[in-house]
Image (cartoon, grey):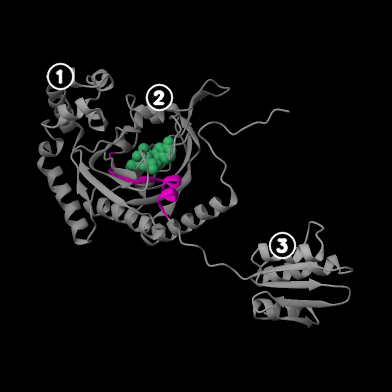
Amino acid sequence: MERIQAPRGTSDVLPEDAERRLRLLRLCEETLGRAGYGPIETPAFEPTELFARGVGETTDIVEKEMFTFEDQGGRSLSLRPEGTAPVCRAYVEHGMHKLPQPVKLWYWGPFFRYEAPQAGRYRQFTQLGIEAIGSDDPSLDAESILLLSELLERAGARGVRVRLSSLGQPETRRAYSDELREHLRAREDQLSDDVRARLDRNPLRAFDSDHAGTRAALEDAPRLLDRLAPDDAEHFAEVRALLDAADQAYEVDGTLVRGLDYYTRTVFEFESSELGAQSALGGGGRYDGLVEQLGGPPTPGVGWAAGIERILLAADVPPAAQARAAFVVRADGGSTALAFSVARELRRHGVRAEMEQAGRSLKGQLKHADRLGADFVVIVGEGDLQVKDMESGEQRPVSSTADVIDLVAGSSG
Ligand code: HAM
């Protein structure tokens, strides 16, 4: 029969990688929990309208990258390409504006974008994200940046760089877009086809281009950062002052544009030099109009998301402390029931314990114990029980399961 393979751009996570991911998950839970963030889970699919309205009709994500389908009732649904719009939907749907503000949430789960697969870019990927909803205090912007920074450091990510900017208010951005469009129009023959085609709808995306002519045309272009309204400029200065006081390195980059339309004020991106073309480890910013746009009361918010697969490409996640390990060998005539219960008792006492279950010879079993990295081997023979310390090579007879536990787990608890 022909083999069936996983869809393009998806991958199975086998135990070794899955363990690294779980260690990272525990690190997140601890780091974010300490800062008062609570976990939230939202569905893997949502009404398509949520992303059209939240992320923006003209973004690449909504225009080209969503897995959209109709359910049996004719409703248009989409696999979630990102988590901020869903979390804001949940905030509104569950009346979270009545809770003490800000509501701080974190999530971890699968997201889906129909992109050309390459190293670090997948059609199903895992995001870790946080959202702090209900306050526009600049300390929340700074705190969220510092949390991602701390997390990446604890995860062992190498070559991390932070870019920071502010996009101001939608009105400022609109006026600036007109100004930039005019600037680029005057240099239209230098632009890439792609940028020229988007000039009407989204001239800011030109900053994402690596086309030489486009870059040259942008060199003397006006900068949004120079156009911010006074209170936005002040907000940005406060975010920066807090980051400076915390000794957080960052680079102000007025060309930073994010691929989602909901941003206002602060935006940032974390990159790693360890990654190739897909260098963004994570990114985020403030979205003070999003909750209202989804039918809720006017509510500011700020957050970020980071790609787990990319973090793992750029990081040496510290190994977890290994529990003591034992392997229960069955010698000729040894009781299966005894081997079975010894293994279970060992586990109850915190030992990682397995027993022989594949019909290997005695020699084969000892070799397997070695392969598993067992610290001890328990040999269940005909009417006798022995414990071998694999490090010292010392082997001694014992009279009961309790003795085995004493020797292996270090207590008869
Ligand atoms: P984003 O920049 O679109 O932001 O995605 C965040 C991170 O997800 C990226 O930096 C990258 O690490 C990872 N990522 C995105 N697409 C892929 C892919 N195809 N394959 C692998 N990894 C990927 C957002 O999604 C916003 N919701 C972030 C946010 C939260 N802003 C405010 N709150």
- Residue 4 drawn at (x, y percent): 65, 31
Q: Earlier in the sequence, mark 1 or mark 2?
A: 2
The residue that appears at 46% across and 36% down in the rendered structure is 122
Vertical order, 142 against 294 (above or below) = below
- Identify the disc placed on residue 67: none
Residue interval drawn in magenta = 298-315
What is the quadrant of residue 310 in the picture? top left
Q: Are marks 1 and 3 in contact (CB under 8 Å)?
A: no
The amino acid beneath tag 3 is: His
Between circles 1 and 3, the one closer to the viewer is: 3
Task: Please name the residue that numbered disc 1 is placed on.
Answer: 185
Whether residue 272 is visible here, answered yes or no, is: yes
- Residue 108 drawn at (x, y percent): 46, 47
Q: Is residue 282 left or right of residue 225?
A: right
Whether residue 82 is visible here, answered yes or no, is: no
- Residue 326 drawn at (x, y percent): 69, 69
Mark 1 surroundings: few (<14), some (14-19) or many (≥20) residues within 10 A = some
Q: Which of 150 and 242 is in front in this view?
A: 150
